[in-house]
Structures are given as C-alpha cells and as structure tokens.
Image (cartoon, coloured by chain):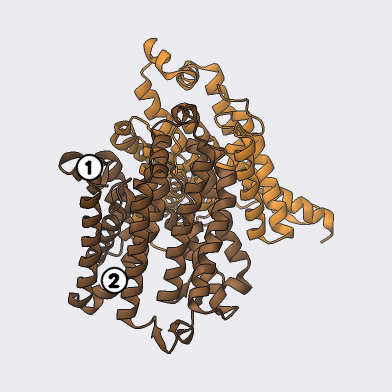
Chain colours: A brown, B orange
Amino acid sequence: MSEASPAKAYALHLGVIALLFVLSFLLPEYYHGLLARIMVLAVFAMGYNMLFGYVGLLSLGHAMFFAAGLYGAGLAVIQLGWSVPAAFLCGIACGAVVALVIGLLALRTTGVAFMIVTMMFAQVFYLLILYFASWTGGDQGMVVPQPARVLVFGATSLELTNPTVRYMTALVLFSIVLLVTLAIVRSRYGRVLVAIRENEERTKMLGYDTFSNKLAAVVVSGSICAASGAAYALLFGYVGSSFASVQYSILPLLWVLLGGAATTLGPLIGTLFMYYVIDITSGYTSAYLLIVGIALILLVLFFPKGILGSIRQRWLGWLP
Amino acid sequence: MHFGPHLLLAALEGLVTSAVLALTALGLSLVFGVMRVVNVAHGEFFMLGAVLAWAITTAIGGHPALGFLAALVIAPLIVGAVALVAERLVLRRLNYNPEATIVATIGMLYIIQQLALTFYGPEARPVEPPFSYRILLPWFGYSGYKLSVISASALLLTATWLVLTRTRIGLVMRATQYDSETAQAFGIPVGRVYGGVFALGAMLAAIAAVLIVPISQAHYLMGQDPLLLSFIVVIIGGLGSLRGTVVAAVLIGLSDGIISMFFSPTLAKIIATLLVAMVLVFRPQGLFGTASR
C-alpha cells in the first residue's frame, strides 16, 4: 500500500467493475447466473476480510452475520410484507445489531478464545433459528414468494427474478461495497486497523482506543456480511438455516485465504476461483467438501498469503 | 413412572454421556494443553473410531464380544496412526502456529468427513454390544453394557492420570506443556512428544467412540456433537486440567441428560453453548483452572 498510487488503485477497481458489467452481455446463461451469485457471496467475503485481513481477528462465526441479514430481510418480506428496499435495510440493521452485541462480548477475548467464542455464538444463533421453527421454517427454510421480489421506482417496477436485473443489482451492491472497503482501507481509520493487527500494544501506547476501533470494525464487517445475506434472500429467494451453519463461517475464511487476506480484490478472486473449481470438479465427483478441505490445508501450508497477496509481494507492490 | 425413577433414569443416561465425553474431552484437552493446538478435527477422529469399529466387527463376525474386543484394540491404533501422519505432514510444518493449525484442522475435518461419506456411506449402522445383560432395578431394567461403559471410562481415566503423574512419559509431557523451550534445552525430544500427544488425543476419542457405538449407531456426521460438547467441557474445566475436565464432563453430561429428558434437546444445547461462551468471555481460565501465566 504505497502512497503514490491512489489513481492507479481506483482505476484498477473501476476497471474490474466495468469488466463485470461487460461480462453480463457476453456470458452464457448458466455462467451469468453463477456470476451473480458469486458477486453476492464475494460481498460476504469482503465483509469477512475487513475483520480477518485488516484487523487480524480470525472469526469462526461470520455465518451468523450473513444469516442475520438473510433472515432479517427474508422475514421482513414473508412475515411482515415489507417492500424490498425496506427489507434490505432491515437485514443490514439486524446484522449491525448482532455484530455490536457479539463484538462487545467477544472482543474481551483474544487469539484462540476469540475464535471459539465467535463459533459458539454462531452455533447458538443457528440453534435459535431451528428452535423458533414456527417463524423461521426450521431446517426446511422458507421461499421468498416471487411477487414480493419486485423493486418499484415510481411507475417502473423491476422484477428481481429477471436474470439481467438480478445480475445488475448484484453488481451494484458489489461495486458499492468494493469502493467503500477501498475507501476505508485507504483512510486513516483503515491504517489504525492495520496498526492494531501488526502490534496492538504499541497502537494503544500511541493513544488509540483499540477496543472501540476493533468494535467498529466488527460492526462494519457484520453489516457488510448482513448486506450480502439480505441481498441473497431477496435475489435468490431462499432463506435457510444451512446458511447459519458452521460451514458458512468457514467458507468466507477459505475464500479470503485463497484470494489473499488484506487485499481489496482478493475476496472476489477467491470466491470466483473456489466456485469454479467446485463447479468443474462436481462434474467428476460429488465430494466437494474434500476439495474444500484439501484447499484449506494446502493454502495454509504453501500459500499463506493467497493469490493476490503473493502477486502483491512479488510484482505489484501498489496493489491495495 | 414416577418422578424419582424418571430422574434416576435421566441421571444414568447422563452418566453414560459423561463417561464418553470425559474421554473425548481429555484427548482434546491434552492436545491443547501440551501443544497449544485447537484440534477442530477431534470430533472426526471420534467418528473414525466408530466407523472403524463397525468395519472391524463386521469383518470378524462370530460372537459379538470377539469383534468388539478386536475393535477396541485395532480402531484406536488406526486412528492414532492417521493422527500421527496428519501431525507430521501438516501441523509440524506450520510450527504449531495457533491460527494456521485451526484452519488446517478444519481442512482435516472436511477431508475425513467426506472420505467417510464416500467409503462408508450416509447410513447409520449399528454395532452389536459384546453382551446383553439387563440389570433389573425395582422400577425398570437397565442395560448392563451401559454401566460397563461407565466403569471402563473410569478405569481409562484413572490409567491416564497415573501415566501423567507417575511415569517418566507423563513427566516429559508435563515438562513440555510447562515450557517447551526449556524442555528442549534439557534434551526432551519435543517434536516427538508433540506427535505422540496428538496421536494419544485422537486415540482417546476413538476409544470413547468404540465404547459408545453399541449404544448409538455409527454415522459419518456423528463427530459434530462430541466436538462441541468436548469444547464446552474443556473450557469449563479449564484448558489442560485433567481433574477439571472430568468434573466438567460429569456436570455437562448429567445436566444434558436431565435437561434433554424434561425439556427440548435444542433448548438444552442453546443454554449450554451460551453459558460456555459467557464463561470464556468473563472467566477465560475456566471455572476450575487457575489464571494463565
């Protein structure tokens, strides 16, 4: 992250967004739908990266923030009959509140205890979803009805079930979150976070309140993950408890590790790569968890910096 | 049945859970205590033990006790060997870095689980108990095998305790736990100790699984609950403390048995998990542990 290249960094990010926009018109239908899903999940990974990459806090419970957004938005539409934008905001608000409470508790611990505590809170959240099955649909989940998934702007209405609308909505969300994370990372606040990651004691000595900075990072990270969950519920119309399970806490970790922790574009690359690997291999074997497992071990053994992290180290030092 | 006998039955079932849990959690606790590694794949070693027990008893046939005894010896050995290989190939190369090892053991969890699904299949399969003697109490008959599980577990726990406190191997392990660098300086082969402890931890989980498999069936997802419960036990008992682990296992097993019998099992799990998370937040050394150095 050198100082000299803000223009270069922004140009690169806008270029990626433009590329995704153009791809919308070139891709065959199957990959078009897949990429929309990947963009929404990449937002989840970006939220995770905010905390793991920049603050160095390894959470094993981010599924709970994703699920808070998923259920916050899904229940608002299904049970309360809210409109799509209101439900989306409701999802984010749920994620932010959950993140605030969890952050206040979990940040009292450090290291291994932080991982276990976040995993346990996520497990409680998951079990609560199963326990209140009469509202949440339990392990069956719920389908968000198609007529409710419509964006209304004055006279025009956009159906989110339409593939093009869905792709563009996902792209808008992805672009906003990408640029926001880029701005945060380059800001003073982002630098304080990195300082906490590198040496928390010293940062404290320099007069920064590390606890409230970390808490803010948990809330921002949780809100971004919740935005991804809310978008997932509204765009793909399914709200299920499997999204709250441990597996969905591990997946963003895998995507971020693969793409490169503490790189702004890493989460997208990691998600994209992993999705296509699973997609290709599922043609030969149904054992995709095996691939996830092997990928995790190989990554920590030989590639701890991930794809973009290694590229940044070798060739492109300016990569944000 | 009246409330009293009902409670007795719940307590007995709880004690069986405690017995198995204490063994599993002890394995997790040893690995964490000595190596400072949080082994997320511990539940899968448990599952592997149960699945192997089924495979061995089916292969041997004949009298159920014969196959069961063979499984009790062979299954833990195989699981221990698998753990040793995993430790040599992966954990050692990571220098036992806490965060990297967690990610790596998550990877192992997925690999073992998927291989079990591929080669063993999604069905739950029973293993016949070595003997089927029912002890008749005034209110209900109770399986003699379940009671023998409790005593077998007590025996194994005592043996582990004796090894840890009375033998040279135990001394070496405790020295490594206390300060691995100084231990190394005194000529203790710390790397070998780590390998042995990781294998021993996995073997304890496998023994627990072989003991429980005649009661509950072998299934490829059966490692999840023991993992979570072992975490709970180890945290409440204080990381690396054997006595705390046993006390906590009895406490959790009994309360799990009693709460599950009178309330919803999901609610019991929610309360237990939440309580433990709070213990970890507000009293990180555990209820029985002493503050870390």
Which amino acid, by three-letter code, is at mark 1?
A: Ala
Place of residue A194 in the rendered image (x, y in percent of width and height, measured from the top left): 38, 39
Separation (CA) of disc 2 from disc 1: 37 Å
Kindly identify which chain the residue marked by label 1 belongs to: A
Residue picked out by circle 1: A4
Left or right relative to A318: residue B136: right
Q: Quadrant of the N terminus of chain B?
A: bottom right
What's the residue at 48%, 22% (across, down)?
B177
Q: Is residue B130 visible?
A: no
Is label 2 in contact with label 1 (beta carbons under 8 Å)? no
Of residues A265 and B38, the one nearer the viewer is A265
Q: Which mark is residue A34?
A: 2
| Residue A80, above or below B172 | below
Name the foreground residue: B54 vs A58: A58
- Mark 1 Cα shell of 10 Å, populated few (<14), some (14-19), many (≥20): few
Please state which amino acid type lies under the numbered disc 2: Leu
Chain under label 2?
Answer: A
Nearer the observer: mark 2 or 1; the answer is 1
Q: Earlier in the sequence, mark 2 or mark 1?
A: 1
Look at the image and tell me in which quarter the C terminus of chain B lies.
Answer: top right
Q: Is residue A227 visible?
A: yes
